[in-house]
Image (cartoon, rainbow, N blue to C red):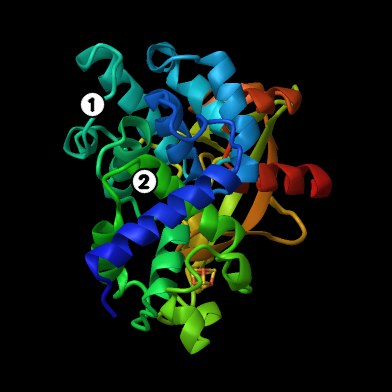
């Protein structure tokens, strides 16, 4: 499937016309044709990775109110940023967000580089985000391809190769279609079309500006596209969480190592997470202290990107003198909200409070 230059020009024009009339109003967006604030564009793009527009809205507003400029964010304490990020998932992104703000503030005088290549040099900015910020904030001739755009392009050309193998082809086709006039609005138009009309299950082809050209619609396979390669089943890992309470009722939390899953966040101390047949005594030997443990009823389940975790909680009470030997922070239950606890740890806390 190939479009002539005239057809490409027409597709670009109809998409921009559609955007002018039907664009979504989003908190981080300027009106079509208006200049955009790169800080807002960048912040929203980082927040939107793996998360929905509805979820991001309040977080975006809260971040902007607290840190109105990239320099304000750069001057914030990392712990404050991680704390404000809670609920958006993937804390590595929050750490990179902060790191990136520092680089922009310290090395670029508080101004984001205005090209895809320049943006790619910043921490936490991959090819998609670089292209999105370059197009949307600086109106560069870049072609970001997110999940929505992937869907629209694969349908327009009726590309049947499954994801992820089809990605290079989608990128190439998408770049060839991008108009030189208002490429930022064009990218946002495709994102909006994918979110509101060319939706995963029931594309509303009857009101789509591209219906006359769309091969997926014509051949009746649009709702099946893009095809996906079957994923291998997720493995399950198991582990212990050690709920250690001091005589005064405070419990022990500690910071996880900076590197690795949930790096730098706080946790109820635990064993490593291992294959389901891991021996109990090995995991028990990883407790911060030898103690009389009581196993709480039930387990806490949590699914990460690549595996499912089942945690068993072991609880104990220890003396002030034993407590003094342990590394970490002692906190009241109410005080736990001051610590950046990832979702899995919040589930462990809730379970321990219910069953101890
Ligand atoms: Fe998507 Fe239908 Fe429009 Fe094709 S015609 S781009 S399938 S909404």
Give the quadrant of residue 180: top left
Give the quadrant of residue 57: top right
> Going by the picture, which residue comes out furthest to the right?
354
Between 277 and 4, the residue placed more toward the observer is 4
Q: Residue at x 81, y 50 (%)?
A: 355
Q: Are marks 1 and 2 in contact (CB under 8 Å)?
A: no
Left or right of 13, for residue 102? left
Q: Position of residue 137 (x, y in %)?
A: 36, 31
| Image height of 187 relative to 334, above or below | below
Q: Position of residue 202 (x, y in %)?
A: 63, 73
Report if residue 66 is visible in the image. Answer: yes
| Image height of 356 relative to 236, above or below | above
Q: Which mark is residue 260?
A: 2
Q: Is mark 2 within 8 Å of ligand 1?
A: no
Give the tally of numbered discs. 2
> Going by the picture, which residue comes out furthest to the bottom?
219
Q: Residue at x 40, y 64 (%)?
A: 150
| Image height of 154 relative to 188, above or below | below
Query: Distance from label 1 to label 2 (Cα)?
Result: 29 Å
Report if residue 271 is visible in the image. Answer: no
What residue is pinned by disc 1? 113
10 Å crowding of disc 1: few (<14), some (14-19), many (20+): some
Q: Position of residue 226 (x, y in %)?
A: 44, 75
Between 48 and 100, the residue placed more toward the observer is 48
Q: Which mark is residue 234?
A: none
Tell me which numbered mark, 1 or 2, is placed earlier along the sequence.
1
Between 13 and 30, the residue placed more toward the observer is 13
């Amino acid at each position: 499937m190939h479009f002539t230059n005239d057809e490409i020009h027409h597709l670009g024009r109809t998409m921009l016309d559609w955007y002018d009339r039907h664009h979504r109003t989003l908190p981080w967006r300027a009106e079509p044709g208006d200049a955009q604030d790169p800080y807002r564009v960048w912040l929203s793009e980082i927040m939107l990775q793996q998360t929905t527009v509805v979820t991001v809205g309040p977080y975006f507003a809260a971040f902007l109110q607290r840190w109105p400029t990239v320099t304000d964010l750069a001057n914030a304490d990392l712990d404050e940023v991680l704390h404000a990020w809670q609920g958006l998932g993937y804390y590595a992104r929050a750490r990179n967000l902060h790191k990136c703000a520092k680089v922009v503030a310290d090395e670029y005088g508080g101004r984001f580089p205005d090209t895809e290549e320049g943006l790619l040099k910043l921490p936490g900015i991959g090819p998609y985000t670089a292209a999105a910020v370059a197009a949307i904030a600086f109106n560069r001739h870049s072609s970001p391809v997110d999940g929505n755009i992937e869907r629209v392009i694969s349908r327009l050309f009726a590309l049947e190769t499954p994801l992820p193998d089809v990605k290079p082809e989608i990128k190439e086709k998408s770049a060839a279609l991008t108009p030189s006039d208002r490429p930022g609005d064009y990218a946002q138009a495709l994102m909006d079309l994918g979110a509101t009309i060319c939706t995963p299950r029931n594309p509303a082809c009857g009101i789509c500006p591209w219906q006359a050209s769309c091969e997926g619609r014509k051949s009746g396979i649009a709702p099946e596209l893009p095809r996906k390669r079957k994923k291998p089943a997720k493995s399950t890992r198991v582990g212990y969480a050690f709920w250690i309470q001091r005589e005064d009722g405070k419990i022990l939390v500690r910071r996880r190592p900076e590197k690795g899953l949930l790096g730098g966040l706080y946790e109820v101390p635990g064993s490593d997470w291992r294959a389901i047949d891991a021996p109990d005594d090995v995991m028990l030997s990883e407790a911060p202290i030898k103690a009389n443990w009581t196993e709480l009823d039930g387990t806490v389940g949590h699914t990460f990107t690549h595996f499912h975790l089942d945690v068993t909680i072991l609880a104990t009470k220890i003396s002030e003198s034993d407590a003094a030997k342990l590394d970490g922070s002692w906190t009241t239950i109410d005080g736990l909200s001051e610590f950046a606890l990832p979702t899995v740890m919040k589930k462990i806390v809730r379970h321990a409070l219910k069953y101890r």
